[in-house]
Image (tube, helix red, strand yellow):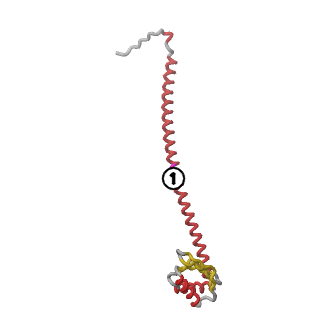
């Protein structure tokens, strides 16, 4: 049996058919609009999380690139220093008096006692500047005797002489 509708209101108070259709259409439009609003909100939230993830990836990649650049800069600086040293060494070795001085220095260092070490050697076309460290006075005496008796150098000048109780005697010489 079909459902029967009883309207107890007087007929003149009942809404018009056009208003009921308009009301139903407005309900449908509001439900669709609200659904679209919820979908757009969810899509915006997803897009926000996606962009946040991309920004964090980009910042970590940027940090890696910065670290790589700084390490490459250090390597470049080392390479430039090495290149400059090689150029200076080639320049020094090209002068013939320098080659003789290097050979004399090799002979001298081989004849020095083991207690004597060279802490600094500067090679100039006309002289050698040597800084030696002798652990005791006997080694210093033997080294100086070897230097003067070797006949490798015409003139030896002592520039400085110092004593450090922990390391020994520090002597700076110019040999010509």
Answer with the quarter of the image where residue 160 lies: bottom right
Quarter of the picture holding the C terminus: bottom right
The kind of secondary structure the magenta stretch mainly shows is: helix
Q: Residue at x 41, y 13 (%)?
A: 5
The percent coordinates of residue 139 (x first, y second) are 52, 83
Q: Is residue 13 above or below residue 141?
A: above
Is 142 part of what is drawn in magenta? no
The percent coordinates of residue 126 (x first, y second) are 65, 84
- Percent of width and height locating residue 27: 49, 24
> Of residues 41 and 108, which is closer to you in this image?
108
Q: Nearer the viewer, residue 83 or 141?
A: 141
Mark 1 lies on residue: 60
Task: Please state the extent of the stretch shown in magenta in the rendering.
Answer: 56-61
Viewer-side residue, 72 vs 30: 72
Q: In the picture provided, is 157 more to the left or to the right than 27?
A: right
Q: Residue shown at 51%/81% (left/top)?
A: 115
Q: Residue at x 51, y 42 (%)?
A: 48
């Amino acid at each position: 049996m079909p459902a029967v509708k009883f309207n107890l209101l007087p007929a003149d108070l009942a809404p018009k058919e056009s208003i009921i259709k308009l009301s139903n259409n407005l309900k449908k439009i509001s439900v669709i609009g609200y659904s679209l609003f919820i979908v757009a909100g969810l899509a915006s939230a997803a897009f926000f999380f996606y962009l946040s993830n991309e920004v964090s990836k980009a910042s970590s990649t940027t940090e890696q690139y910065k670290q790589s650049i700084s390490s490459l800069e250090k390597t470049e600086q080392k390479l430039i220093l090495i290149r400059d040293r090689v150029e200076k060494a080639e320049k020094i070795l090209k002068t013939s008096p320098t080659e003789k001085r290097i050979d004399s220095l090799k002979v001298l260092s081989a004849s020095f006692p083991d207690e004597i070490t060279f802490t600094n050697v500067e090679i100039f076309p006309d002289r050698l500047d040597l800084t030696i460290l002798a652990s005791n006075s006997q080694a210093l005496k033997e080294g100086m005797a070897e230097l003067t008796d070797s006949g490798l150098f015409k003139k030896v000048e002592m520039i400085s002489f110092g004593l450090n109780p922990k390391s020994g005697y520090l002597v700076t010489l110019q040999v010509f």
